[in-house]
Image (cartoon, rainbow, N blue to C red):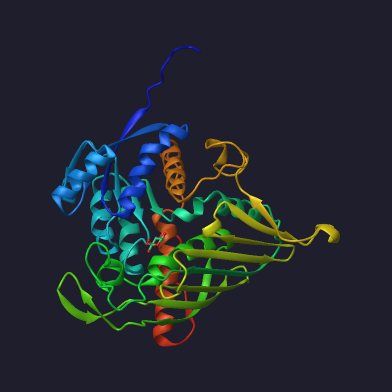
C-alpha cells in the first residue's frame, strides 16, 4: 500500500424535491462513491422542498448540509454544480431552464415535461447553455435490461419482428383515491401532464427505443375509468383529466411491430413492468418483479437442449455487477439510480453526454404526445422527430 489518499474533486449537488424520487437520487449520490470508481465525490449540499420542517428532517436524515423551501436559491447558489429535479412534472421546465441559464449540470426525473412542446423548450435551453443533462429513466440500468441491449447490439436476435411491453399497477382502483397534493399529484393532469402514458409507458417507450430504435407511427386507446375525484389542492371534486389506462400499437423505424399496455387498474399488479422482444434467431424477455433475470431463447441451440433459459444476471462480467457483491448475489431497484449516477459522473468528467439526454427524452415525449393524440382522434398518428437539426 502506498498510503496515498487520492482526494476526488467534490461535486456539490442540490436536489429539488424530497419525495419518493428525492430519496432514490439522494441514496444514489451517497452510495455511488462506495461502489464505483467515479471521478467526483458528490456532496449533498442542499435539499429543497415545499415544507421547511420536512425539508429539515430530510436534510438531517440524508446528511444534507442545508435545506430550503425556495428552489431559486438552489439555482442562484454559485457553489452548486448539479441541480437534480425530483418534483412533479409541471415544475420540470421552469426549473431546468433556469438551471441551464445558470450553467448547472442537470438531472431531471422522467418524464421530461408535461408535453413535447414544453420538452422542446427545455432541450433548446440546455443545448444553448451547453450543460450536461440526463433524464432519469432508471430501468435502462437494471443490469438485465442493459444486458438485453448488449445482446441486441451484438446481433444475437437477428432481425427484430416484435417488441411488446407492459407496465401494470393497481393503486388507483378506488374512487376514494384523490388527485393533487404531495402523494397523488400523478392523478392531477395539471401536475402530471398525462396519466399512465407519461408516468409508466414513458419508461417502456424509453427502453424500447433504446433497444430497438425510433417509433414512427402509433395507434392508441385510452380510458379514464373514474371520471371525478376529490382534488386535495382545491378541496373540490373535479373531473379527472388523466388516462388511467392506455394500450397502443406502433411501428418501429426498423420495420418491427410494437404492442404496449399500461394500466393502474390491473388488480394484483403493483409495478409489473415486462417486455419481450422476438427476433429472427432469438427472443428476450424480462420482468421487473424478477429483475435480476433475463429470459433468453436461441433457436440456433441444438434442438435437444433448445429452450428458454433464465440468465441470472449476477456474474461480475455482466453490466454493473462487477462493482457489487459476488456472483449469485442480487441487487435491486435502488441500484439502477446508483448506476445512472455513476455513468453521469464518469461522462461529466470526460465532457461526454449520458443517455438518455434531454433530447433523447424528448423523443419519448413525442411518442407520448402521439399516443394521446391518437387515442383522442381515433386514428394512427405519426411521431414527431426529436433529432437535432444541427
Ligand atoms: C408510479 O407509481 C411510479 O412511482 C412511477 O412514477 C415510477 O416512475 C415507476 O418507476 C414506479 O411507479
Q: Quadrant of ligand 1?
A: bottom left
Residue 113 on image: x %, y %: 33, 63
Point out the residue furthest to the bottom here.
Answer: 378
Residue closest to the eye, 48 or 355: 48
Horizontal relation, residue 44 to residue 6: left or right: left
Horizontal relation, residue 150 to residue 108: left or right: right
Instruction: Give above or below for 216 relative to 99.
Output: below
Location of residue 322 by image quarter: top right
- The number of numbered badges drawn on the structure is 0
Q: Is residue 99 visible?
A: yes
Residue closest to the eye, 233 or 369: 233
Location of residue 80 by image quarter: top left
Residue 315 on image: x %, y %: 63, 41
Q: Is residue 131 visible?
A: no
Residue 143 on image: x %, y %: 55, 48
Instruction: Give above or below for 327 relative to 145.
Output: above
Quadrant into which the C terminus falls: bottom left
Residue closest to the eye, 361 or 187: 187
Residue 243 on image: x %, y %: 37, 77
Instruction: Give above or below for 227 relative to 313.
Output: below
Horizontal relation, residue 209 to residue 199: left or right: right
Amino acid at each position: 500500500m502506498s498510503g496515498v489518499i487520492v482526494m476526488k474533486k467534490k461535486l456539490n449537488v442540490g436536489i429539488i424535491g424530497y419525495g419518493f424520487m428525492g430519496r432514490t437520487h439522494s441514496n444514489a449520490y451517497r452510495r455511488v462513491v462506495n461502489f464505483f470508481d467515479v471521478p467526483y465525490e458528490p456532496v449533498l449540499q442542499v435539499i429543497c422542498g415545499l415544507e421547511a420542517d420536512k425539508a429539515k428532517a430530510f436534510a438531517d436524515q440524508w446528511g444534507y448540509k442545508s435545506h430550503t423551501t425556495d428552489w431559486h436559491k438552489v439555482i442562484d447558489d454559485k457553489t452548486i454544480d448539479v441541480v437534480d429535479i425530483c418534483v412533479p412534472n409541471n415544475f420540470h421546465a421552469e426549473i431546468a431552464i433556469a438551471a441551464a441559464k445558470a450553467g448547472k449540470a442537470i438531472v431531471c426525473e422522467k418524464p421530461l415535461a408535461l408535453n413535447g412542446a414544453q420538452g422542446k423548450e427545455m432541450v433548446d435551453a440546455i443545448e444553448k447553455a451547453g450543460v450536461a443533462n440526463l433524464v432519469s429513466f432508471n430501468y435502462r440500468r437494471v443490469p438485465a435490461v442493459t444486458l438485453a441491449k448488449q445482446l441486441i447490439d451484438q446481433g444475437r436476435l437477428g432481425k427484430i419482428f416484435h417488441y411488446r411491453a407492459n407496465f401494470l399497477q393497481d393503486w388507483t382502483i378506488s374512487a376514494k383515491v384523490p388527485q393533487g397534493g404531495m402523494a397523488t399529484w400523478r392523478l392531477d393532469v395539471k401536475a402530471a401532464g398525462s396519466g399512465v402514458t407519461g408516468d409508466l409507458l414513458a419508461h417502456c417507450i424509453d427502453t424500447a427505443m433504446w433497444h430497438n430504435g425510433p417509433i414512427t407511427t402509433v395507434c392508441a386507446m385510452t380510458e379514464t375509468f373514474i371520471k371525478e375525484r376529490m382534488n386535495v389542492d382545491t378541496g373540490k371534486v373535479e373531473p379527472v383529466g388523466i388516462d388511467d389506462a392506455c394500450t397502443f400499437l406502433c411501428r418501429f423505424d426498423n420495420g418491427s411491430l410494437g404492442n404496449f399496455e399500461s394500466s393502474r387498474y390491473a388488480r394484483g399488479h403493483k409495478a409489473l413492468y415486462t417486455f419481450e422482444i422476438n427476433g429472427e434467431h432469438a427472443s428476450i424477455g424480462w420482468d421487473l418483479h424478477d429483475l435480476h433475470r433475463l429470459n433468453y431463447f436461441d433457436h440456433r441451440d441444438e434442438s435437444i437442449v433448445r429452450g428458454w433459459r433464465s440468465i441470472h444476471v449476477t456474474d461480475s462480467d455482466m453490466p454493473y455487477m462487477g462493482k457489487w457483491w459476488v456472483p449469485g448475489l442480487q441487487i435491486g431497484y435502488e441500484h439502477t439510480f446508483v448506476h445512472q449516477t455513476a455513468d453521469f459522473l464518469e461522462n461529466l468528467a470526460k465532457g461526454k453526454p449520458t443517455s438518455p439526454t434531454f433530447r433523447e427524452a424528448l423523443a419519448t415525449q413525442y411518442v407520448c404526445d402521439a399516443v394521446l393524440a391518437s387515442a383522442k382522434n381515433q386514428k394512427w398518428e405519426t411521431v414527431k422527430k426529436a433529432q437535432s437539426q444541427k
